[in-house]
Every structure is written in structure tokens, then in C-alpha cells.
Amino acid sequence: MAERRRGLTIGGYAVVMVVLVLMAIASYGAFTVSEFQRIRAEMDAASQQAAAAEVGEAMDVLLRDADEAAGRFAAWEEVRQQIEHPRYYPYWRSYRMLESGVLPDYVIDAEVYGADGTALTELEDSVLPHRVATPPPPAYVDLSSEQPTLLVFRSVLGPGDDADVRGVVGLRIAFTAPLKRSRSYVYVDPDSIHFAASDSSTLSWSDLKSAVRFELRRNPMSDAVSGLLSGTVANLSIVLGIFTLLLFPALVFLIVRPLRAISTHIDRLKDSPGGLVLGDLAGILPIAETEKIRESLNAYQGQLVDVHSTLEEKSQELWAMAHHDALTGAKNRRAFEEFMHSLPQALGDRDIGVCFALFDVNHFKAINDSYGHSVGDQVLKVIASRISSVLRKGEELFRIGGDEFAVVLLDCDESSALRIAERCHEKIVGHDFGKLGVREPLRISAGLANARIDDLDDLQTLQWKADVAMYRAKRPGHANVVMFNESLARDSEGLFSSWVNTAVYDAVVYGKGLVMYYQPIVDLTEGTVCHYEALVCIEQDGEIIQPSNIFPVVEARRLEVELDRAVIRKVLDDLKAGKVRSGTGVSINLSGPTLIHDQVCAWLGAFEPYLKDFRVMIEVTETALITQIGLANDNLSRLRARGFDIALDDFGSGYSSVRYLASMPVDVVKFDITLVQGLQDVGQANMVTHLARMILESGHHLVAEGIEDLDMLESARAAGFGRGQGYLMGRPAEHAKLDRVTFDNVTQFPSDRLA
């Protein structure tokens, strides 16, 4: 059933709508004001540019007038006379030069120089330099006094066609006041014209233009428009806000009130499905739609009362069909799996024994083939009936396969379980199957396995143990009812086809011969060991069974969860024994079925005391097909929150690389050896490098697997891998004592350093 969506009430949505409308009005007003301010700023910027051009033009005109005044002064005949006869120059300069009208009023002082650039006479009251360069320098500004002045120099030439330079004239001009009154400014406030301070005592005229400062004339029209627009926006926002606030009570009265009445009526129907009628919703302003809803709801309620009893009967029938075997009447495998899953919760804290009994019809295939499926079906029905007649009250019979039946006996010790199973066998042996046309005697084999309800590990393996016991019961010379014991897994040659299978079962069930080897995962920059990957092996009769021979048996018998539990316990023992160096880490591979197991977080919780000294990484083997990806992600997220690292192993070789990487909470991505070897291939290196960089940019750490030589190491470094694993850094060993691999400029790593 889909989870019920929680939402706001109708009134809540109405409030949200009003708030959104008010926010929209405010946003519109703010946007309008912002746009006006932007336009105003653009206009001010344009006015600033025009004002700068206006002042610059006025300064150019002033400089041109000053230059023309200097030219007229240089061309004055009396100036040439003074140069030729400088005896009377002081008198002429004091009483004639400034009073003659040749020089404009804004000229503060003037000076006449000889051909060598020296003033005709050195006077104390002169404010011009005593000596100038020849030819004379260009005009410049003197900033040494309180008011800046302009100094302009011109050469004095001979009369007529005589172009010889006879001397030089210089003018000192006060230009600030003339600049302010020289023209009618449109954009500039002339009284505000001034010049920025400078560290230098002189400036060129062009530099002075850069230092000019001024303020713009105020624009009354612009201020008036701005005020008018701001007032208009404010008034419009107030009007719309008041309208919205008035609309809210009307909305509540016309729509919310009848809808809330309908909702309340529906809530009442949950507790009392029949006999309730929704009354009038109209009020003084009826709404056609709500009235139609009321009429339809009342009509539907009447129909619902009629079908309620029929629906309940059909529901019970469907549940029975979904959980019962149509042929034998026993419960089916679906009901069995639900029962086993809920068994620990159903019994709670009751400390009782649980016995799993598995029944199998001997040679049923031969009976089916000899007498036909119709007779075979009748045989199964009789067997189910005989077994059910022996069971105690409350115990259910499950058909979990073609001719396999199972019973879970609660609060039952071994002797009681054996008696019940033997009575079932006697009931079946004592039945006359000749009535069905079966001439051969018909027997069953029963395998039993006991566990305590509080031992979840044993509960997980009950069916497998019963299966082992049942196979022993089928062997010639053995009783038809067998209780599982520890020797059965070692001695059942009929169940295990080879010594490898025997070794695998011993290791999984009893931990016998299970050995963990640890291979370092090394930081390729600093040489520190980040983690040791725990690799499982089995020692049997002096030989080592490799993972390549272990996992096919595990997967065929669906022992992935049991093997992972055994590995977890073994790694914990190794940490306690100090086989892994403190300050490093250990990574553990988990299968798909274990990742979705509801107890995986509890199993791994035993590592939490070691997290302060070790980094523990959970490696999700990408070659494992994980069908319940959501449940796996929930478990991984909980483990990650507790401090575990999560790695995606064998990236690039499994079912759905990108899907796992995109959906799982992964910290580390381990590139499969086939991808790492691709770095040596010109055609594949570019693709692998781009893939590595893309994953790095997404925030993951990268591990290159299978690094066996220096060339592969260099290729992995160049592609961006920060960590590496392979025989070049160290082979798997039972003791993981090294915390660093020392290398300089890609030194060959000894393969036995971690042994």
C-alpha cells in the first residue's frame, strides 16, 4: 500500500496563496523600483560622461586662448626691442607690460627671456622661472601655490621674414576662475569644479584634465519623476495588498468551509462506514460543485455499505488463495517465507526451542512418471493430509516445493520433534496407496534441525541444516527421520560432491579452515597504507582453496549470507589478535543478499569499538546483482553514518556500474583490473582517464586494482588515481603489519614486503 501523502489543509493552502500573492506584489514593486533605479543610474552615468566632455572642452578652449595670448605677446614689437636693448627692461616690465592691454586680465605675470633662455633681468617680484629651456617647453601647470596656475612659453622670432629665434616669453595664468565662468555649463555645476591633490608640484595639461573633479547640476524633473513613480508603486502595492487580504475571508467562507465539512465527514466515515449522511453545505451562498460532491458522496456511501460485506468475504478468499496451495490445502511457499521472516518478532522474548522439519517423498519423480501426474497429485494430497493430522494445535504445514513439505515446531525439544516426525512417517506408511493404483510401498524422508529462538544466526540456517539431515535420511541404511548434528555436514558425501564442497560448508557453518589474507591498498603519493582488503581462503588437508573455487559453491547453495557472517567474525578475531596494524584500515567484501539483510547493521556493529584505531570499509562487489537497491542503500547509509567507509569494488565489470555509482552512498570507487590495464592501451587510455576524472570530480576517491609493474603505476598516477592495489605494492598475507610503503621517484616495490 502506498504511503499516505501528508499535505496542508484547505485553509493552509489559502494562507499560502495569499502569502504568495503578497510576495508577488512586493516582488513586482521591488522589480519596478529596481528597474527605475537602473535607468536612473544609466542616465546619471551618461550625464557624467557628458559633463566630463563639457569640462574637457572648456579646458581645451582655455589652453588655446592662453596659447594665443602668449603668441600675441611674443609677436609684440616692444618685446623684441626689450630683447635687443634690455637696459630699460625692469622699468618697461613694471609700468608698460601689464598695463598695455596686450595681455588678458587672467595673466598673473609675464617674463621675457633672451635667446639662451635666461630672463633679461633677474627681478625679485617675478613669479616665473629665471631660466627656461630652448626651445621652450610645452605648457604645464604649477601646483606649488594655493591656486594652480598655467605656465605657457612661446619663442620670439625676428621681424618680417626673419625666422631666427631672438628670445622666449613666458606667461603665468590663473585659470581656475576663467574655467568656471568661461561658458554656460549644461551638465556641470561650475562652482564645484576643482582638481584632485597630486604628489607632484607640476602637471602636464593632459594630466590636469584627468585630475579635474566636479559635481553635476541637479535635475528637478528627474527627481520629480522618481518621486511620482515611487509613490505610484507604493500606492498600487497597498491597493493590491488590501484586495488580497479582503479576498482571503471570502475564499474561506465560500470554499474552505464546505470543503472542511466534507473532510470531517470523510473522517467520520472511517470509524463508522455506514449510516452517516452529509448534511446541507449551502449556507447563504451555495456552490454548485460542493453540492454535487455532497450528493455524490452520500450516494457512494450507500453503495459502499452494500458492497462492504461482499468485499470482506472476497478479501478473505483472495488471502487464502495467495497463501495456500490449491492442490494440497497446505500453506504455500509465500506463506512460509512470511512466517519465517516474522517468527522472531511474533515470539518476542519467549525463550523456547524451534525445530524445522523438512519432509520429502522418496522417488516421487518415478511415481509421477510411472502413474501420471493425476496420481502424483493424489499422492501429495494424501501425504499433506496425513502429516497435518499429526501436527499439534496451531502448527501449520507448508508446501515449499514440488514434493517438499515443511513444518515449524515451536516449544519443542529434539526428542519431541523426532516423535512427531516418526508419527508422520508411520501415518504415511500405514496408508493404503493401492487404492490410487500405486503398487510400490511409499516412504518419506524427514530432516530435522533445532535452534533457540534467541539465536538469529541458527534461525537463518535452519532450513539448510534440515536439508542436510533430509539428504542423510534418503541414503540407504539410514533412518527415515534424521536430526541434524555437526558431523552430518562433514560426513554427508551424498550431499557434497567433492572435498571442496565439504570444505566450504565446514568453513561457512563452523568456521573450520577459514583464513583471511590481507592485501594493502596504498596511497600512491605518500606511500601510506590506507586499508588492507580482507580476502577469504580455506585451508583443507594442507591445501589452500582460492576464492575462485569457494564462491561458485556458495552461490549455488545460496550461502552468501552465511559466508559473509563467517568472514565478519574471522576479521574481528584478527583485529583482536593484532594481525592488522593499528592506524591503518580493513575493507570487507559483502554480497548482495547480505547488503539487503535486515541484520547486517547489527552484525557490523561489532566493529564500532575498533573504529577509533582502524578505518573499516565495506566493499560492495559490483558483480553482485542487487535487486532491492533501495533496501541496500538504506543499510549502507546507516553504516556510513556510524563511521564506515563504502567502496564500490570491481567498477566496470558488473551488472550496472553507473547505476550503482549514482544511487549508492559510495566514498571509494575501485576500478577493475581490466580498466586499469586499459591505461596501457592507446585506444582505451583516453576513455579510462576521462572516466576516472569524471568520478574524481564527483567527490569520490579512486583505487586502481591490479598494479603489477612500474608502467602500470605511472599510468594510474597520470590518470588521477590516488590509491592503488596490486602485487607491486604487496601480496596478500595473513599478517598486515606495514603502515607505509617507501618509494622515491617510482621505486620498485618488493612483492614480499607485507609477508
Image (cartoon, rainbow, N blue to C red):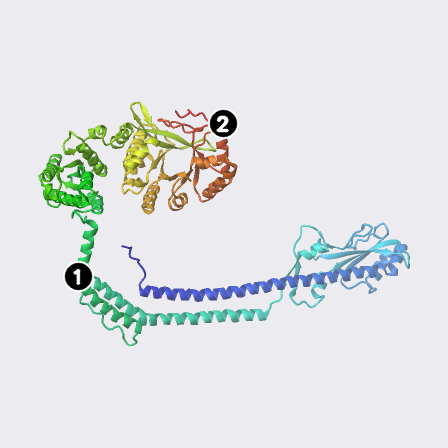
Q: Examine the rendered structure and indicate whether residue 120 appears above or below residue 686.
A: below
Q: Amino acid at mark 1?
A: Ser
Q: Is residue 20 left or right of residue 680?
A: left
Residue annotated with mark 1? 309
Q: Is residue 589 left or right of residue 208?
A: left
Residue 692 seen anywhere in this rendered image of the structure: yes
Number of numbered discs visible in the structure rendering: 2
Q: Alpha-carbon neighbours of circle 2 within 10 Å: few (<14), some, or many (≥20)?
A: few
Q: Is residue 404 left or right of residue 236?
A: left
Residue 348 seen anywhere in this rendered image of the structure: no
Choose between 644 and 600: the one closer to the eye: 600
Circle 1: element type: helix
The disc, 1 or 2, on the residue closer to the chain's N-terminal end is 1
Mark identifier at residue 88? none
- The residue located at (73%, 57%) in the rendering is 149
Dividing the image into 4 quarters, which one contains the N terminus? Answer: bottom left
Residue annotated with mark 2? 747
Q: Amino acid at mark 2?
A: Thr
The answer to which image quadrant residue 340 occupies is: top left
Do the CB atoms of the residues marked 1 and 2 lie less than 8 Å apart? Answer: no
Picture coordinates of residue 663, whole percent (x, y): 38, 46
Q: Mark 1 or mark 2, which is nearer to you?
A: 1
